[in-house]
Amino acid sequence: MPSNQTNKSTEKQSRHSLKGQKLALKQPLSLDGGGFLDPVTIGYQTYGTLNADKTNAILVCHALTLDQHAANEHPLNGRSGWWDHIIGPGKPIDTDKYYVICQNVIGGCLGTTGPAELNPKTNEPYALSFPIITIGDMVRAQAMALEQLGIDSLFSVIGGSMGGMQVLQWAVDYPGKVFSAIPIATAAQHSAQNIAFHEVGRQAITADPNWRGGAYLSEGVKPHKGLAVARMTAHITYLSEPALQQKFGRNLQDRDKLTFGFDADFQVESYLRHQGITFVDRFDANSYLYITRAMDYFDLAADHDSSLAEAFRNTKTRFCLVSFTSDWLYPTAESKAIVKALNAVAANVSFVEIESDKGHDTFLLDEPEMFATISGFLDSAARARGLEKRRSA
Amino acid sequence: MTSPSNRKSNLRPDLALIADMIEPQTRVLDIGCGDGALLEYLQENKSVDARGVELSQIGVNASVARGLSVIQGDADTDLIDYPNDAFDYVVLSQTIQATRNPRQVLEELLRISHRAIVSLPNFGHWTVRTSLMFGGKMPVTKSLSDPWYSTPNIHFCTIRDFVDLCTDMESEIVQAYTLGRNGKTSAFSSKSMLTNFLGENAVFLLAR
């Protein structure tokens, strides 16, 4: 585990000083759990140019532990954006044609107000005094931010995993604002298995003595070990059994034989430990608690008499769902349930299941069939919205 | 804009015939849409709100990449998901003979849409009859190319069989055409015995 070198004062300031665009919401954010969050800062990134009619905006929604730095160098670790291969000039989400916005979700820790931010009332980090948030709250904050940016409607909303949940929530909560939607590797409600894995992660964090009842930032420590274990567990769920077997098998890590100890003898152990260690440098433990909770609470049908079809009734949005054969976290059946609900209201829906042995994380990888799906669908939607004509003019 | 594949002359003859039956700016669901050739033609030439269902995932993925609204699905099990009168036309081309319950599928088609267009291979065609009569084996012809043990076509019928089913279901045959070997189309009266002998494929426009 890395040593805890960050002292209290620099930690309080560091996330405020990160590079990137920010805006302050002009209104308090009302919350599904009751009450308001105020003030709210939204960290976001944009790529491409908004056209004169403001009809070419695409909102990209990020997954649980990702952030707004979808297609630029990450300010914390210098790595390229998590969808750098998808967003850019001539890429499936073509920034020569579209204006792309990606916002850090509320509850996050990369510029948007979350539990690591200072509560202005106490001048201490919110920690557990931060309110419980939902996917609906995240989307409401995004909508308010877009309104302040002068963007009244979205050509498309795209995202994978928790990003896909936001895409679905957008289509349901703001049907008139979403021309097309691409929910990838996601579900309309969090399954028992997914809640179970999240609970393991949260228990690992809160069991770390450095968690300090959530007040670790005020006390100048960090629950690195707990957060790393949470990440290691979750990371396994993002892969697949064949992918792990193929990549690591029973290969030993930098040694010829077993050590008969508890050191990382196997490559897969070393790999997971690395995943845990690198994660704690860029993610806040309380953010992990809050965002996983928001995902657990996600149930799109719940507010519509338990009918997913009712949630989508009268939708004019064009949908394109994508799932991956080896994704056992958000299996194809979950996407099919959404397709079924959309068919029940005669919505315009495409659905592609892509053959992949790389599990849930395929949505972040170089997957040509996913690229072809996204660009084909967007091109067609652009023609339907009259964006293509302008391009050839 | 129109690519060579979007010209009607490049459509399979029964699909070209179906395309002619469909009014512009309507809502069309093509069940068993294959690679989406008909949908693409209708979308680009008739401004149709075109949707497709296809059993093969490869066909679906290719269609979506071409910008068509297509989902993976099965005519036997998935039509029940659609609401009444969701479409102006439902197309079932060269698929009904491969369904497990053709009558139920037809009923679903005419529930989802007021009009259904069905094309099917005619098992009463003279080549089929002569093949069975003189060869004594299950016919393998140009349009029915699979041997009996691996054919997906589990519910063959003749044109007259199909007309009888429509009568039984009290659905109206608005238009009917046969397609000969050379792709030549001709309108026919449902009572003609000769049609059932000479038509290799048939296309019906049905109304509820």
Image (cartoon, rainbow, N blue to C red):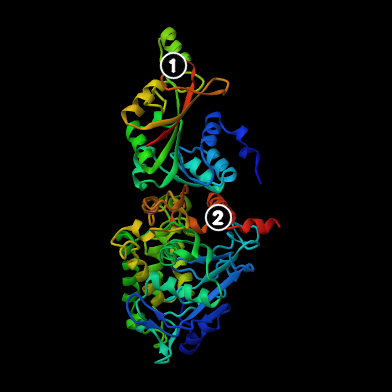
The foreground one among B15 and A138 is B15
Disc 1 is placed on an element classified as loop
| Badge 1 density bin: few <14, some 14–19, many ≥20, Cα 10 Å | many
Which residue is denoted by mark 1 in the rendering?
B139
Which residue is denoted by mark 2 in the rendering?
A381
Q: Position of residue A293 (x, y in %)?
A: 34, 71
Tell me the number on the disc at residue A321: none
Q: Position of residue A171 (x, y in %)?
A: 44, 63
Disc 2 is placed on an element classified as helix
Please give left or right for residue A52 compared with residue B98 in the image: right
From this view, report whether residue A376 is shown above or below residue B203: below
Please give left or right for residue A283 compared with residue B37 in the image: left
Q: In which image quadrant can residue A204 be found?
A: bottom left
Q: Residue at x 40, y 92 (%)?
A: A121
Quadrant of the drawing holding the N terminus of chain A:
bottom left
The chain under label 1 reads B
The three-letter code of the residue at mark 1 reads Pro
Q: Nearer the viewer, mark 1 or mark 2?
A: 2
Can residue A96 be seen?
yes
Q: Residue at x 52, y 67 (%)?
A: A153
Q: Position of residue A169 (x, y in %)?
A: 41, 65
The foreground one among A79 and A64 is A64
Kindly check if marks 1 and 2 are in contact, taking CB atoms under 8 A apart as contact.
Answer: no
Mark-to-mark CA distance, 1 and 2 = 45 Å
Q: Position of residue B10 (x, y in %)?
A: 61, 33
The chain under label 2 reads A
The foreground one among A289 and A152 is A152
Q: Residue at x 40, y 28 (%)?
A: B97
From this view, report whether residue A177 is shown above or below residue B15: below
The foreground one among B177 and A190 is B177
The three-letter code of the residue at mark 2 reads Ala
Quadrant of the drawing holding the C terminus of chain A:
bottom right
